[in-house]
Amino acid sequence: MPLIIVTGLPTSGKSTRAAQLHKYLSTKIVDSKYRLHLISDDALSISRTVYDLSPSAVPAHTRSANASEKDARASIYGAVKRVLSDKDIVILDGMNYIKGWRYQLHCEAKALRTPSCILQIGCTVDRAKQVNTERLENKDSKQPEAYDRSNWENLVFRYEEPNPMTRWDSPLFTMIWEDDEAQATKTFDSMWDAIAGEGRKIIRPNQATEQRGRDADGDYLYILDKETQDVVKRILDQQVEDAGGEVRIPLSAPDQEDLIVELPAGRKVGLPQLQRHRRAFMGLNRGGIGLEAVGNMAGDRLRGSFVRYLNAAFENDE
């Protein structure tokens, strides 16, 4: 059953709509084999301060890493993975404001052959800001937690609106602040028909998604780290005193020719530069971006992909 990703500006009414959706779906799955889950920051006891990048909240030297937000996102991702299946409906209530994060969730659902969709909560910036201001002024009330003003402004600035033209942001359903109960039910009906009704599409994971998790050599992320580290070490070991030239990278299969890393002419490549390219390559592969054409990501294929990435990077650096 589907993964429903709720998104919108901070304090735009997402949790209210998620609760309405949960109530609606609860009646839909009565006496069925399906289970329903509502996952949110509040349910996982994640404070809204983890999204605060202001200098007063995060030291300047750690702002780019934003470790607290990454840890929170990892907790949410783990909670989704634990319950998502073809017999579970998962409502993920949150801003979900980064398109790469929504892509990652889309891939997770697709790998399990279950659909995903986006429920966008439309609200003007002024209205959402007014709600947050009222919560800040009534901290002792039973209202939901408010965002600090600078944190709220930063999240609005960073919000990446869903694009229905992309596969990970579709199908896209939208509700606005003014929608009454009848309009909400109408939207929920359309959502149910699209992702769980008779017209539901059959989800087929692509080859890279099916084979990326593990292969005969072990865990994918372990292999990714091991193979890229080995390529970097061989470049450093084989790099001749004279700058430039070629470095041969062998493959494990005996019948395949060595890979060739073409170093920049006129200068040597140091460890910092190689590690920078390695981290960038791992970041792309870890998120699944651009891997659709790679197929079986075994050790030799990862090694070949990294060598091609390095050659392109060196060419662009010149």
Image (cartoon, helix red, strand yellow):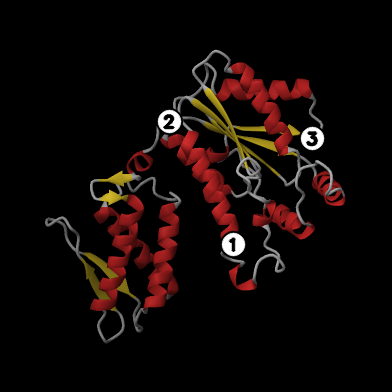
Q: Label 3 vs label 2: CA separation?
A: 33 Å
State which quarter of the image contains the C terminus. bottom left
- The residue tagged 1 is 66
CA neighbours of label 3 inside 10 A, class few (<14), some (14 to 19), many (20+): some
User: Reading the chain from its start, which is encountered first: label 1 or label 2?
Assistant: 1
- Residue 177 is labelled as 3
Please indicate whether residue 46 sits to the left or right of residue 135 in the image.
left
Residue type at the position of mark 2: Arg
CA neighbours of label 1 inside 10 A, class few (<14), some (14 to 19), many (20+): some
Across and down, in percent, residue 72 comes to 57, 51
Residue type at the position of mark 1: Asn
Q: Residue furthest front?
A: 140
Residue type at the position of mark 3: Trp
Q: Residue furthest bottom?
A: 241
Q: 248 or 88, which lies in front? A: 88
- The residue tagged 2 is 113
Above or below, comparing residue 7 to residue 224 in the picture: above
Across and down, in percent, residue 234 comes to 25, 72
- Residue 34 is labelled as none
